[in-house]
Amino acid sequence: MLASGGFDGRVQFWQVPAAQPVGSLSGHTGSVWELVFTPDGHLLASGGQDGTIRLWGVAGEPPTPG
């Protein structure tokens, strides 16, 4: 799985090696500048031009506080 950030504020997920889009997340109101998966692959953090950092579960849902 590969994630890319766009100027439209969306995070796009890609299936590798087929290079096929498999879904996207939206929430930022500006460009997505940074993306990083946690070492266990369960969360994705995204940072955007809007000055926010968002945490996403691998299924695209915000994580539930533990």
Image: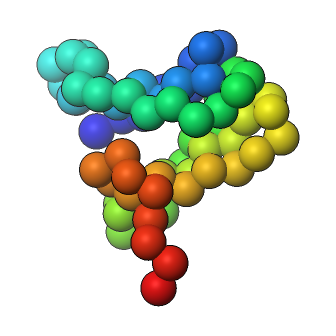
At x 38%, y 52%, the residue is: 61
Side of 42 relative to 56 (left or right): left
At x 83%, y 40%, the residue is: 51
Q: Examine the rendered structure and indicate whether residue 54 appears above or below residue 43.
A: above
**Which one is in front, 34 or 10?**
10
At x 38%, y 28%, the residue is: 24
Side of 12 relative to 34 (left or right): left
At x 65%, y 32%, the residue is: 28
Furthest residue in direction left, as rendered:
18
Q: Examine the rendered structure and indicate whether residue 28 appears above or below residue 19.
A: below
Side of 64 relative to 1 (left or right): right
- Numbered-mark total: 0
Q: Percent position (x, y) of residue 32?
A: 65, 28
Picture quadrant where residue 15 is located: top left
Q: Does residue 33 appear anywhere in the picture?
A: no
Q: Percent position (x, y) of residue 6?
A: 58, 18
Report the quarter where the N terminus lies.
top left
Q: Does residue 53 appear anywhere in the picture?
A: yes
Picture quadrant where residue 43 is located: bottom left
Q: Percent position (x, y) of residue 23?
A: 29, 28
Furthest residue in direction right, as rendered:
51
Side of 55 relative to 47 (left or right): left
